[in-house]
Amino acid sequence: MHLSDILFHHGENRKEYYNSVSPPIIQSSNFVFENLADFRKAFGEEMESVIYTRGNNPTVSILRKKIAKLEKAEDCLVFGSGASANAMAILSQVHHGAHVVCVNNAYSWTYNILTQYLPKFGVSHTFVDGTNLEEIEAAIQPNTTLLFLESPTSIVLELQDLKACAAIAKKHGIVTAIDNSYASPIFQRPIEHGIDIVIHSGTKYLNGHSDVIVGVVCSSKEIIKKMFYAEFMTLGAIISPNDAMLVIRGLRTLELRMKRCHESAMEVTSYLENHPKVEKVNYPFSPNSPQFDLAKKQMDGAGGLFSLHLKTDSFEKAELFFHQLERFSLAVSWGGHESLVLPFCAFYNVPGKENTNLPFNLVRFYIGLEDPKWLIEDLKQALEVI
Ligand SMILES: Cc1ncc(COP(=O)(O)O)c(C=O)c1O
């Protein structure tokens, strides 16, 4: 199906709602039945029926259909956050005594569910260097059920070879899952490379306007059906119909936004890579990236997120650089309209917390929808303090 068809029409049966261009927000928790026969029929096929919004809601269903198609998946579930989508995908693939192999530098709350939560239920894990296929395969144990990837990772921007990882997992009979938030389905569709489960923090690009927290899990009908009756219905981490409508609206411009972010980040990173005050830029589509060939092989673009190392040994100068920036907002997250900066010196001297083990001269940037030349002007004047 053509991308334009998915973003602008797929899943939208306008005849059902006065031919309105925008789908209605069915803001109802509950749905009534006219007779016992219909009620029984719905309960017999709960996943396909509209009974109660914790299970299905017509507005949320439109979103599910669009995202599944974008990821070339058979089906999709939408969750109340990307963190819950990651957690549910992992929970759906483990049991007491199981083992998970996960790449280093995965999102912090993914790390948390593996290290702080699942050990309580007898699920163990091994973290591996995702760039090293031998290390990934060597970490697989007889009780391993899941290989969890995040490619690229969102701080140091490391890629895993998706096809090779899927082949290793298939050889050992284990399921693969990936957090695909960085690339969005516009730039990377892991199912095409043999990955089984694709997860997004839809809070980032899918919604794209920094006003909804949402997560998605895409996979085969079989895996999604199992998740629906287990994790989805039991744990209840759903989004509201109103938020679903906002994400549907965000999707209308997904392709445009991704292209803009990619082109702008290419311009900004190529400026920074040639700057004497910048030691190194981490961006998968930079021709200087050690993983550029792999990036081109499995991605169609990279979007707006990158990180760099400032050329300085001085903590004060790293702080000064940040203070000097005027057109980037200090914030976590990314994927919205606005450009952001996350300097890692901010994770030093936090009351009650240990310092991060990431270097203080590491800075993550997200390039949003502004004019890249206007952003470069700001970076140029801020780098002068180094
Ligand atoms: C790579 C990645 N995955 C998952 C998440 C979690 O998503 P959410 O904030 O929607 O729960 C984040 C959030 O920052 C993220 O950066």
Image (cartoon, rainbow, N blue to C red):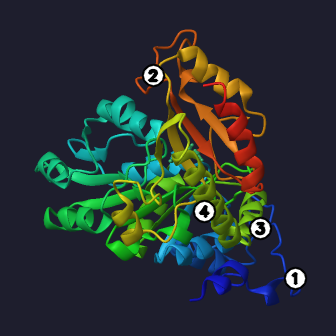
Which quarter shows the N terminus?
bottom right
Q: Is the shortest distance between ligand 1 and the CB of mark 2 under 8 Å?
A: no
Q: Is label 1 in a helix, a strand or a loop?
A: loop
Query: Dot 4: what SS?
Result: helix
Circle 1/circle 4 CB separation < 8 Å: no
Q: Which mark is residue 267?
A: none
The residue that label 3 is drawn on is 249
Residue at screen point 73% across, 32% down? 325
Residue 262: give its label. 4
| Residue 68 vs residue 286, the one in the foreground | 286
> Element type at marker 3?
helix
- Total numbered labels placed on residues in the image: 4
Q: Residues within 10 Å of mark 4 (few under 14, many from 20)?
A: many
Looking at the image, tell me whether mark 2 or mark 1 is earlier in sequence order.
1
Q: Nearer the viewer, mark 1 or mark 4?
A: 4
Q: Nearer the viewer, mark 2 or mark 1?
A: 2
The image shows residue 2, relative to residue 53, as above or below, that is below
Vertical relation: 256 (above or below) 10: above
**Could you tell me if the residues under marks 1 and 3 are in contact, i.e. CB atoms within 8 Å?**
no
| Amino acid type, mark 1 | Ser
The type of residue carrying mark 2 is Thr
